[in-house]
Amino acid sequence: MRSSCLLALPFLAGCLEIGKTTYRFDLATGEGTLVLGDIRTDTPTDAAKDFGELVNSYVLGNKVSEDHPSWNVGDRRLYEDAGTLAGEVKFRFGRPSDVGLYQYDKKSPFLWCAADTETVIRTTGEIVAPYPKCVVFDRKTKVFEITVQTGTPGNDGQSLLPEFKTWDGSEVASTGDSAMEGMKGLLGALSGLAGEGGEGQPDLGAMLSGLSGILPATEPGEAWKALNLPLDGGTVVLSTDQMLEISYAQTEPAAQVGAFEKALAAAGWKRTGEEAGAVAFEKAGASLRLSAVKAGETVLVVLSH
């Protein structure tokens, strides 16, 4: 396997490689699973250090939760699989968009897109012909599965299975300079699933609005228009009675949240706190959630009742 440096983020010395990644989401239970197959290092002399960062930050540490605040992260483990090292993360999620599943309305199919560095090699859905990195699922689907390959198959790299076989299950002592800068996004083959994006992630806003036959761009409903939201410069990609999604280019999530908070306050909505990465509001017994997530070079703002 040729090194992809995990979404092109290099180690200070060396880089982890993932042969394939399998995503599984169950909307009926709100449970998700991420399986990383054939975990290797491209620099054999750094194998011990790379394995230590993998264990300390992601298996025993809190990095997965920090990278994905909308997830309730559960069991994480490393294990041997057919002579290779594999990893598994289990988590719970509240909404389909938390794992990158988007839907125009309840009668439309679900859409999921891989990162630019990934190639879809197996799925229970159907690949979108004009967008081979995107998969469409029937609207009645409850369990979604996608397997992607990162990088290009080859003979480079060394498996970290030997390090795993001698691991005693405890924190690994440091073997040199920290490689944390290079570890950002390790399990973030999924960072785009929560819209957190970054280099290598698809521009979901443009993708959603561009799939005219599946997720056509739309106009906000009258109830949303009445809130006088800051829609200038945005593209409405979803508008139902329960949800509004707008894509903005060249901006940051915090800026969009601030602008929407001002508009909601002016419309009489009271901010009541934050939950699972979203800001909560109430008015006359009704509730509203606001979130803004990075998706490549765009920001996707979501309002939902």
Image (cartoon, grey):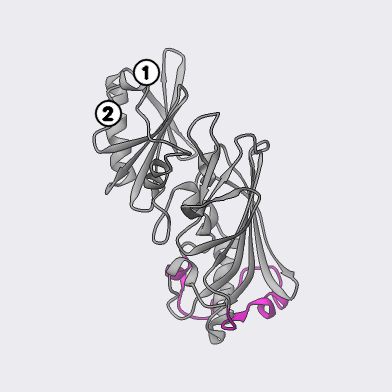
Dot 2 corresponds to which residue? 262
Position in image of residue 149 (x %, y %)? 57, 65
Q: Which residues are magenta?
A: 154-183
In the picture as drawn, the residue positioned furthest to the top comes out as: 284
Dot 1 corresponds to which residue? 223
Kindly indicate the quadrant of the structure image that contains residue 257. top left
Q: CA distance from mark 2 to mark 1?
A: 17 Å
Position in image of residue 79 (x %, y %)? 72, 67
In the picture as drawn, the residue positioned furthest to the bottom comes out as: 45
- Left or right: residue 132 compared with residue 208: right
Q: Secondary structure at mark 1?
A: helix
Determine if the magenta segment contains residue 162: yes
Determine if the magenta segment contains residue 60: no
Position in image of residue 20 (x %, y %)? 61, 66
Q: Residues within 10 Å of mark 1 (few under 14, many from 20)?
A: few
Residue at coordinates 54% horizontally, 29% vertically from top-left? Answer: 106
Say if 188 sits above or below 284 in the image: below
Residue 23 or residue 10, whichever sits in front: 23
Residue at coordinates 52% horizontally, 47% vertically from top-left? Answer: 112
Q: What amino acid type is highlighted by mark number 1?
A: Ala
Residue at coordinates 72% horizontally, 76% vertically from top-left? Answer: 165
Determine the main secondary structure of the stretch shown in magenta. Answer: loop
